[in-house]
Amino acid sequence: MQTERNAIVTQAQFAQQYREYLEKNGFLDTTIRLQKQPDGSVALPVLCNKLNQLDHLNLCDTVAPGSTCTFTLLKNPISSKKALVKSCHQRLQEELCALLKCRGVLWTEEVSHDVPHVWKRHGDMIVLNESAFQAEIWKTLEPEVWHLVANAVGVRRIAKEGRISADGFRTPRVTLLLGDDAWVHHVDNGIRYTFDITKCMFSSGNITEKLRVSSFDCRGEVVVDLYAGIGYFALPFLMHAGAAYVHACEWNPHAVDALLKNLELNKVSDRCKVHSGDNQQLLLRNLADRVNLGLIPNSEEGWPVACKLLKKDRGGILHIHNNVSLFHAKRDSLVNKKNNNARSSKEQRQHLTEMELARSNSEMTSPASTYALQSIAIEENTPDLRWKNNKSKFESNCGTCCEKKRATHPEWQVWAESTALRIRNILETHHKKPWSTNILHIEYVKSYAPYIDHVVLDLECRPCDNN
């Protein structure tokens, strides 16, 4: 059956100008190719729902003075390359639909929602979200359905993730659906990682913190990573921050295997010693310029160990990760804001009403009252901001250059000040002399469930006789 599409025809020398104008203003039909006409002119397909708007535009003068512009109908238009390219999700859905049709199964809305739009990719493996392919029909089609999915998205192996196990190792509950080997390769910020995806986590959500660690200047420094995992932070300290030596502590044997491989893979194993087992039993003392405590929801059990690791004659910096709850502060602020806004808005509207009554003979609304009404609307709809824009650079006592952001959320500051005080008490108890702690920076990493923020405190710790 013959199909037709609306198009604008102009001379070839003006076609590019028309194309840019039509595309910029949303008139161009990008699903259809431009077509050269027998007389050498060019037909540019336009969206039919935009024809009324185009009729009222003098395109010849607006787009290219001296050009001609006429409307026509393209017979059997050819689809553009863009229209022919399908997303992985579209291809996957079409092939799954065909598979179910062959088996006499109806394609329902429930089944359609089961098909994932996104997934994690590690080399030739994809990891599906826990919510994907939950309908019982998929189990009856194994393993054929997984081969189909693999071909559709261009991989050889498929895994599906579940919740993190509460086994102390944070072992991921990942099931291998297709393939025999669960070891994957991943490149992150120029660092190569390999790990067994069914035994170890890879936290892609911490990328901003890994980039920040990479920006540190740790030349000549000894760093201890108390919760090293597969090398999330140990490797950035070694490869980008330039640490002289890193002690990496990890008690998950599967993560230790991956960490040793990753050190070899990135050719930095000569500058790192891996300490397998519980870091509470660590015998190291008095050697660290920095200690990284990258455990959430908190790393409080590691604080005494970290304090013993810092150099007793000059101290160092602790990077302390923590999940800070904002629930009570958020609830209280919302209640207070609602009460204040209701009271303030009521008073302002009452005042404006009186102003308008006083000007009832006037046909125009006063600029002052219009501005006041707009201000009320803006104040009532202004989102809660985490950061102020002012930043300052400073240099710490150990020569590390940092960029300081001022946290607007008081809960972060309360937690940081409490932590600083507790760390100082631990240091003074251990060393039997006064120490000082200084909050250098509070870094926001990411948010979890409502009102829980993952933050990192950079805490400078110095013996007082060294200040």
Image (tube, rainbow, N blue to C red):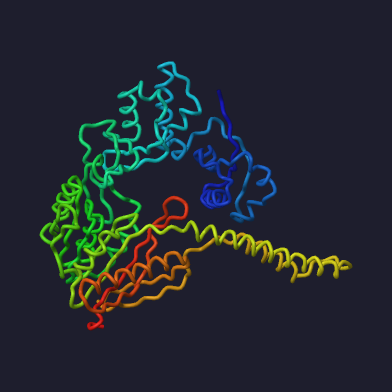
Residue 377 pos. (x, y %): 66, 61
Q: Quadrant of the C terminus?
A: bottom left
Residue at screen point 33% across, 57% down: 298
Q: Is residue 388 left or right of residue 354?
A: left
Q: Is residue 380 above or below residue 129?
A: below
Q: Is residue 439 above or below residue 302?
A: below
Residue 135 pos. (x, y %): 42, 27
Residue at screen point 55% across, 23% down: 1
Q: Is residue 102 left or right of residue 382?
A: left
Residue at screen point 55% across, 41% down: 29
**Number of numbered discs visible in the structure rendering:** 0
Residue 170 pos. (x, y %): 28, 46
Residue 340 pos. (x, y %): 64, 65
Name of the residue lying farthest toward the left: 270
Which one is in front, 196 or 100? 196
Q: Quadrant of residue 232?
A: bottom left
